[in-house]
Amino acid sequence: MRKRRYKVNNKGKAIGRILVLAAGLLIIIGLIFGIVKLIGSGSKKGKGTKELPFAAGANYAYTGAGFLYFDAGRLYYEDISDASKDTSYKINTEELKLAASKGISVLYHDTALQIVGGGDSLVFSGKVLGVRCGNDHVAVLREDSAGGTAIVIYDKSGIQVDQMDFDATDLIGFGFSNTSDETLWTLEADYSTPTPVSTLTTYNLATRRTTGVMTVQGQLVEDVLFTNNSIFLSATSSLIRCNPAGSSEAYRMTIYGWELLDYSIVDSGPVLMYGQRGADAHSTIKLYTMAEGDVGTAQIASVHPPTGYVGAFLMKGKLCVYTPTQLYTYSAKGELLSTEELGETITGAEKLSDNHALLYKGDTLLISVK
């Protein structure tokens, strides 16, 4: 069950009572303030591949325009398209986690959190379980000393603007929509009934009001996808489109036996990538180009990727399949558009965004720009 609380609470004054870690975070404040304007401001670059200055096992976060990473007692920012924006600063500890979006970057630990350029460190009496970054807000999943669970919302300045309390066993996911408005969503599961019940709740952080509650009976919702016109719920048996305002379901389609692997939002509509559930390697990939009206229609295409591929995902509405030496690009209709030689022998590939892919060459990382 969820309880909503609103309060403003800046805990920066309590820093003196906190561990050495928090002191280390405070030193970062003045030093990395200048990074704020760099994140998300990089211009686009043509196609190409660039080796990254950190290895696969490094502690790093992708911001949308570059990377924050730790190395040898320093925090670095590496811009993908503009080397003049690269910078680094000495820090007291690398025992920190990173979370970032195009608008906000965060360094945190179990008991403290620092919004880059956001004033004093935030201190918690319990434990930080997870952090999500939106355009203008940060959501912190926190467990207090009594075992209670809450999502605490902060603005860019580190001011707490909202809090939502949950039963620890109910909440299974949370995050921000990838749309123009600042929508926070939470996903809960109720196992107390004979069949599972999933509930998606959306909140407008500008008005601090609940904007929708969508309940799915008899199956678990595994993924949530937002567009400006729709909310898609990918569940264990159905793909469900809901209207973004309120909780009305427009339609659902059967996807039993298939799981959502990736998605891409383009002008022609969202493209969803499905693979056979439970398969380690997918011999068949289905591409769904979804309608955003009240009628459940979709353009569905099947692609049989080349054997031995090391990565497959959607970028700008197209399916990109990487083998160790080649990139195969397919349209949303399943047509092979091109085959490109990589010029490298890679061991893996994963999507960072619709513009950037991360390629693995053993422990070496490469960034691929589309």
Image (cartoon, grey):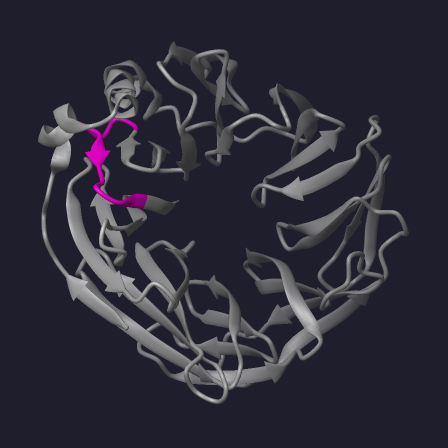
Which residue shows up at 22% across the image and 54% down it?
Answer: 146
Which residue shows up at 57% across the image and 25% down it?
Answer: 58
Q: Judge whether 196 appears above or below 188 on screen.
A: below
For this orientation, the residue located farthest to the front is 146
Q: Judge whether 356 appears above or below 275 on screen.
A: above
Q: Judge whether 96 appears above or below 219 on screen.
A: above
State the residue in front, 132 or 72.
Answer: 72
Q: Position of residue 233 (x, y in %)?
A: 50, 72
Which residue shows up at 56% across the image and 57% down it?
Answer: 266
Quarter of the figure with the C terminus? top right
Q: Position of residue 98 (x, y in %)?
A: 42, 33
Q: Can I make out residue 51 in this image?
A: yes
Where are the magenta residues, as a range?
116-127
Q: How many marks?
A: 0
Q: Position of residue 217 (x, y in %)?
A: 47, 86
Task: Give yes or no for residue 125 being in the magenta stretch.
Answer: yes
> Chief secondary structure of the magenta span?
loop
Task: Give yes or no for residue 309 being in the magenta stretch.
Answer: no
Q: Judge whether 281 appears above or below 361 on screen.
A: below
Residue 368's quadrant in the figure? top right
Q: Position of residue 184 (x, y in %)?
A: 32, 58
Left or right: residue 316 versus residue 34 is: right
Q: Can I make out residue 134 in this image?
A: no
